[in-house]
Image (tube, helix red, strand yellow):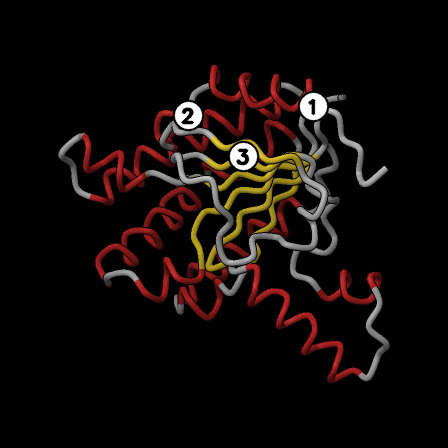
């Protein structure tokens, strides 16, 4: 099996890592951000074209404590204001996309403008795409897509449905990596684009997911045979 073109990551385990270290939950998220930078750069160095990272679910931002939600949003703000995401994009010539119901969940005009500016500044980069799923829920994505089709009166086909998906312009996901030792799906994660994906589950908590763990996931991917129903 060749090298994947699109990898999606479900980075589970930040809070459990913090608890094991006797730290506050948000300190786990801070360490998770550091892991994100290292993993993203390593994958782009390897030649990955599309990386999708589930930074925060819809429930993360709408059901958790106000303090933790505020911290998650401030983390995003800090990384954008410090140009960390922009610098990663420039270094690797990758386009940045932020997908999900983040506008409604953030409710911060300046941060919303900063995200839109980041997307605009990188829109012409052509070596790859880094998609950050923020306030994202796969079931809500599918409901929004079918609702839009129903309102438009268009015939529902695989093609028309995909065009309405928030993630519809991305290629199918070849490999999904979920850390944290809980081998299950969450909130219909990218259900259309992961229909034929290879799944890699690891007990390693996201803050401990290093380059060695990346290589393990890719090695497992390479030795599998994708029959795709044939």
- Mark 2 or mark 1, which is nearer the start of the sequence? 2
> Which residue is rendered at x = 65% and y = 35% of the image?
198
> Which residue is rendered at x = 67% and y = 78% of the image?
147
Q: Residue 177 carries which label?
A: 3
**Quarter-wise, where is residue 63 in the image?**
bottom left
Q: Quadrant of the C terminus?
A: top right
> Which residue is rendered at x = 38% and y = 50% of the image?
77
- Mark 2 or mark 3, which is nearer the start of the sequence? 3
Element type where label 1 sits in the image: loop
The residue tagged 2 is 209
Q: Where is residue 102 in the image (x, y as percent from the top left)?
A: 48, 62
The local crowd at label 2, few if under 14, some if 14 to 19, many if 20 or more residues have their Cα within 10 Å, is many
**Foreground: disc 3 or disc 1:** 1
Q: Residue 224 carries which label?
A: 1
Q: In which quarter of the image is the N terminus?
A: top right
Element type where label 2 sits in the image: loop
Q: Position of residue 131 (x, y in %)?
A: 59, 45
Query: Foreground residue, 126 or 144?
Result: 144
User: Rounded to the nearest whole Å, what is the CA distance between mark 1 and mark 2?
Assistant: 22 Å
In this rendering, position of residue 89 left or right of residue 160: left
User: Rounded to the nearest whole Å, what is the CA distance between mark 3 and mark 2?
Assistant: 11 Å
């Amino acid at each position: 099996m060749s090298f994947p073109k699109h990898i999606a990551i479900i980075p589970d385990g930040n809070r459990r890592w913090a608890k094991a270290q006797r730290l506050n939950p948000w300190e786990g998220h801070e360490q998770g951000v550091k892991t994100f930078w290292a993993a993203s750069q390593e994958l782009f160095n390897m030649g990955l074209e599309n990386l999708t990272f589930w930074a925060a679910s819809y429930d993360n931002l709408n059901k958790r404590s106000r303090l933790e939600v505020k911290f998650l949003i401030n983390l995003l703000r800090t990384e954008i204001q410090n140009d960390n995401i922009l610098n990663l994009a420039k270094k690797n010539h990758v386009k940045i996309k932020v997908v999900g119901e983040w506008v409604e969940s953030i409710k911060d005009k300046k941060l919303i403008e900063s995200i839109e500016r980041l997307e605009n500044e990188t829109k012409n980069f052509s070596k790859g795409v880094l998609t950050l799923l923020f306030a994202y829920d796969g079931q809500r994505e599918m409901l929004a897509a079918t609702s839009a089709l129903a309102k438009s009166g268009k015939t529902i086909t695989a093609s028309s449905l995909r065009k309405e998906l928030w993630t519809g312009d991305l290629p199918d996901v070849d490999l999904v990596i979920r850390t944290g030792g809980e081998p299950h799906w969450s909130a219909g994660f990218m259900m259309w684009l992961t229909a034929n994906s290879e799944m890699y589950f690891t007990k390693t908590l996201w803050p401990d997911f290093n380059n060695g763990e990346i290589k393990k996931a890719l090695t497992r991917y390479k030795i599998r045979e994708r029959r795709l129903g044939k």
